[in-house]
Image: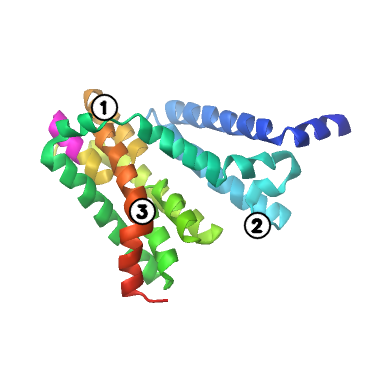
Amino acid sequence: MDIVETVFVRNNLVVAFAVVGLTIWFSYLLADKLTHGRIHGSAIAIAFGLLAAYLGGVYTGGSTGVADIALLGGIGLMGGGMLRDFAIVATAFGVQLSELRKAGLAGVISIFAGVIVSFIVGAVIAVLFGYSDPAEITTIGAGAVTYIVGPVTGDALGASDAVITLSVAAGLVKSILVMIGTPLVAKFIGLDNPQSAMVFGGLMGTTSGVAAGLAATDPRLVPYGAMTATFYTGVGCLLGPSILYFIVSGLFPA
């Protein structure tokens, strides 16, 4: 057992990839069998990650969740800024500006409107819960944009791990609400054509939530909604640590 433990500890990054891979596989299995696609597998995987981080912190009394456990120390590197930012850049790399033109002016406006409105809602909730530091308010507000924008913004502004975790949780809640709510409101908002799907994706922004919600509404609309939702994430990552932070700093000086 000592030999096995030594091998796992020395190759903890490989172990981290294996654990995350198994978690994602199991999450998508649950999403398919239990929710029939109504809740996206990525949302379940993130929920598992947040739960594991909490339980790991309680078990070890540490500050980095499961990464405090020697066998899972590689998760600290895997979840660090380098690989996370690489994943975000890789996602954005597949987007072509020529495709955005298909969404028209309404699609472009919906992206910026969606980011700003979501940020305002998240920031207001942060203030109501007693947060007054501009970086913390901005991070939580960015989390309400998406659970990717929150960590990117928090890392850039030097927010604490606890606040960044809250931003991820806020984005997760939004994603699940979009997944479940989209089929329920589709008829009432005219979500039955590619143009409306593009606008909807730009307003909601959470790619996993939009994709799963549209798949449950009309699978043919998924590519259109996902396209603008992807741009939404990129715009949020640009505005969060810059313009939006400066505005919050002006309203809540440190």
Query: Residue pushed farthest top?
Result: 220
Is 196 inside the magenta-drawn segment? yes
Q: Residues within 10 Å of mark 2 (few under 14, many from 20)?
A: some
Which percent across, then down, holds residue 220?
A: 22, 23
Instruction: Please tell me whether the stretch drawn in magenta is mainly helix, strand or loop.
Output: helix
Q: Amino acid at mark 2?
A: Ser
**Element at badge 2?**
loop
Mark number for residue 144?
3
Q: Amino acid at mark 3?
A: Ala
Decide: is 50 above or below 28. Answer: below
Decide: is 219 above or below 153. Answer: above
2 and 1 marks in contact (CB < 8 Å) = no
Answer whether residue 90 is visible to the viewer in this image. yes
**Element at badge 3?**
helix
Mark number for residue 223?
1
Q: Which residues are magenta?
A: 193-199
- Which residue, given by chain and number where applicable, does mark 2 sit on? 63
Q: Does residue 91 appear to the left or right of 14 in the view shown?
A: left
Q: Residues within 10 Å of mark 1 (few under 14, many from 20)?
A: some
